[in-house]
Image (tube, grey):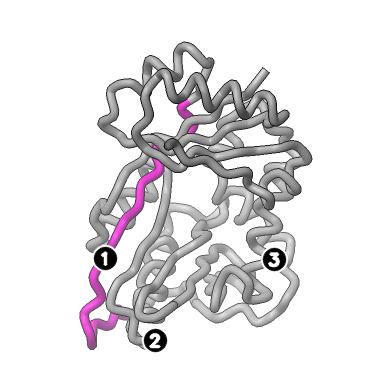
Amino acid sequence: MISFEILKWDSDFFGFTIAKINDKFISLRDFRNIYKELKNKKVKLLYWPSDLNFSFQHEISKEFNGRLVDVKTRYKKEIKKGDRYIIEGQIFTELYKELKPDDKMLEIALQCGEYSRFKVDPHFPSEKFVELYKTWLIKSLIGDLADEVIITKKDDLITGLITVNCDEGIGNIGLVGVHNDYRRMGQGDILIRTALNFFNENKCHTAYVITQEMNHEACKLYEKYGFTVDSKTNFYHFWIK
């Protein structure tokens, strides 16, 4: 039996019913049956995270007008006790303690989503993409999606941010980005170093971060600091008509 679920948060946020197939391998016949069932349930959008090496996904995508919107790439790094990265130079980091983001932070949050499937897929209204990333940032600041939001500053202006959380020895990086006006100054390095120090201080033994394969700069940055690819998933969108 192929498993799928109706995604309540996504459906409520975007204003139409969205479902997700939970199986990474599925036959064309089973997909046809699920597609028909979801269409009868008035589902408008179907997510399918598919195994990277599953050969039938291309056939399924072609028949049902699926769009490969992301190669979701999860990176992993083992944190060694006592490791400490030095933060130096003219760029400063601090924990952001306000519950409301300033304008620069909102700009950075939107720039974090440059390769997001919600921006890559043209069916999503641009205003919903903006709202989604603003919501992500605000929920991080109030502690729903992150333990801390770390920022970089230059000349008293916020220039970059990274959100981090720790749970039972596992560290996770959420949003991470440097404002377009301050890139190529080493700020991404400083954000990653500060996050890794935070994980170490909070006794995390492993850290994870998820990005898009097409975000080459982010991938290179994580790999520079010893993150290795833990998994890759082809992420498809099917708009049901």
The disc, 2 or 3, on the residue closer to the chain's N-terminal end is 3
Q: CA distance from mark 1 to mark 3?
A: 27 Å
Queried whether the magenta region covers residue 75, the answer comes back as yes
Left-right relation of 217 to 181: left
The quarter of the picture where residue 102 lies is bottom right
Badge 1: residue crowd in 10 Å (few <14, some 14–19, many ≥20): many
Q: CA distance from mark 2 to mark 1?
A: 15 Å
Badge 3: residue crowd in 10 Å (few <14, some 14–19, many ≥20): some
Q: Label 2's element? A: loop
Give the numbered dot on residue 109. none
Residue topped by disc 1: 77
Specify the quadrant that holds the N terminus.
top left
Q: Label 1's element? A: strand
Residue topped by disc 3: 138
Instruction: Give coordinates of residue 19: x percent, y percent.
Output: 60, 38
Q: Amino acid at mark 2?
A: Asn
Q: Amino acid at mark 1?
A: Lys
The quarter of the picture where residue 129 lies is top right
Queried whether the magenta region covers residue 214, the answer comes back as no
Towards the viewer: 133 or 50: 50
Residue topped by disc 2: 202
Instruction: Give coordinates of residue 96: x percent, y percent.
Output: 61, 78
Identity of the residue drawn at 68% across and 32% down: 124
Identity of the residue drawn at 38% across and 15% down: 59
Q: CA distance from mark 2 to mark 3?
A: 23 Å
Q: Amino acid at mark 3?
A: Ile
